[in-house]
Amino acid sequence: MLLFATSDKGGTGRSVSSCNLAYRRSLQGANVCYVDFDFGSPTAGAIFDIEELRHGTPGQGIHDYLQGADSEAERHSVWAESDRPELQARPDGAGDLVLCPGDSDGSEFPGDEYTVDRCVNLLLELSREFDLVIVDLSAGRSHATEMVMSATARPELANLPWRWIVYHRWTQQHVLAAHSLVYGERGLVETSKIFDQNFQRKFLASIRYVRTAVVNPDGDDLEGLKPTQVSWLRKIDADLHQMAAKRKLGRMNLLGSVPLDPVLQWREQIITDDDTGNLDIANLATAKAFVDLAVKSSEELFAPGLEAIARGIE
Ligand SMILES: Nc1ncnc2c1ncn2[C@@H]1O[C@H](COP(=O)(O)OP(=O)(O)OP(=O)(O)O)[C@@H](O)[C@H]1O
Ligand SMILES: [Mg+2]
């Protein structure tokens, strides 16, 4: 399974949520590969706490691989190489958790036939080897996005299952921006139209949304707020639900919501069971949300909204 992670804006929580999804899926026994395709800011090394990959790799990262002639992109086992003690040993029953880092000196570059060929080869090879391959793309309407879309439209990848996750924060501007990334001018749907109708249909059906850093207006952690603030928050939350549903970002196409978490507000990292248990610094609901995303991202049922979207319901 290939999972492409995108967002309209930067700083939405795309990388942190995707790394946590990868971690949880691997704990569930799947072999997972995380490919840092964010040409401008490859941050996965920092999130997995691999010091030497904090800003991407100085060696053979994804960008060098795509543009160059070398046969392999660098791979790093998170279990073996993380500097974080809780991540250092693969827990019993866990699958592989491998990072293909971006290059530390990488930047956006337009794809061409050659780079798309390389991308096809990479995705084919990784899909053969791993149960789940997560591709973290650059934010917005990026060259990286066009490149992977062109790759998935190739006949070599036609039979591979792939899906798209659009991350967005739970605010008015982010909901509008996520909608525009998918349905707006030069958006994902418009880009998919350069390929055949089958591809377009498959593409549209494969899109799901994840809301990040969401404040639950009924949550216990609002105890510090005044009653007027809580009722205002509930009203805004209800308005957002309406706005999202009108723009096809409603429940039908929602993969999950990640709560606002104090740990992630302060540090980009994996939330382990130690963080929610022994250390008691992260919220259990956050870890649960990542577990849930990990399960849902690989479920057959991922696509029940397909016909509904096509018919314009929601
Ligand atoms: N659920 C959350 N609760 C609180 N903070 C969060 C949450 N998810 C992410 N963050 C924080 O938001 C910031 C941006 O997250 P992240 O780097 O994952 O975003 P991104 O969309 O990948 O950004 P970029 O476009 O720069 O790659 C980080 O500081 C991260 O820790
Ligand atoms: Mg990122």
Image: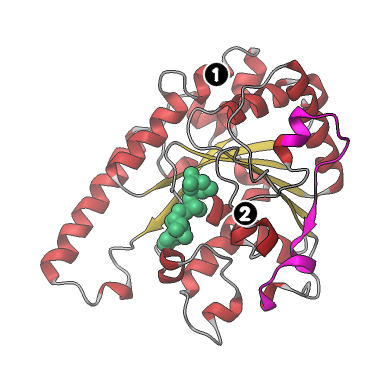
Counting from the top left corner in percent of width and height, residue 125 is at 85, 38
Q: Secondary structure at mark 1?
A: helix
Q: Does the numbered disc 1 mark a residue whose Cβ is under 8 Å from ligand 1?
A: no
Q: For residue 137, what is the image quadrant?
A: top right
- Which residue is found at the position 46% from the left and 28% from the top? 182
Kind of residue sitting beneath label 2: Ala
- Which residue is found at the position 48% from the left and 40% from the top? 253
Is residue 108 shown to the viewer in this render?
A: yes
**Magenta residues, as a range?**
64-85
How many numbered markers are drawn?
2
Counting from the top left corner in percent of width and height, residue 168 is at 42, 45
| Relative to 228, 139 lies left or right | right
- Which residue is found at the position 28% from the left and 42% from the top? 172
Q: Quadrant of the N terminus?
A: top right
Counting from the top left corner in percent of width and height, residue 131 is at 79, 50
Q: Quadrant of the C terminus?
A: top left
Q: For residue 226, what is the image quadrant?
A: bottom left
Give the mark nearest the N terminus, 1 or 2.
Answer: 2
Kind of residue sitting beneath label 1: Thr
Mark 2: few/some/many CA within 10 Å (<14, 14-19, 20+): many
The way the protein has been coloured in the rendering is: secondary structure
| Residue 191, numbered circle | 1
Q: For residue 229, what is the image quadrant?
A: bottom left
Counting from the top left corner in percent of width and height, residue 122 is at 80, 35
Residue found farthest to the right: 71
Q: Does the numbered disc 2 mark a residue whose Cβ is under 8 Å from ligand 2?
A: yes
1 in relation to 97, above or below: above
Q: Dot 2 corresponds to which residue?
A: 44
Q: Secondary structure at mark 2?
A: helix
179 in relation to 268, above or below: above
Q: Is residue 78 magenta?
A: yes
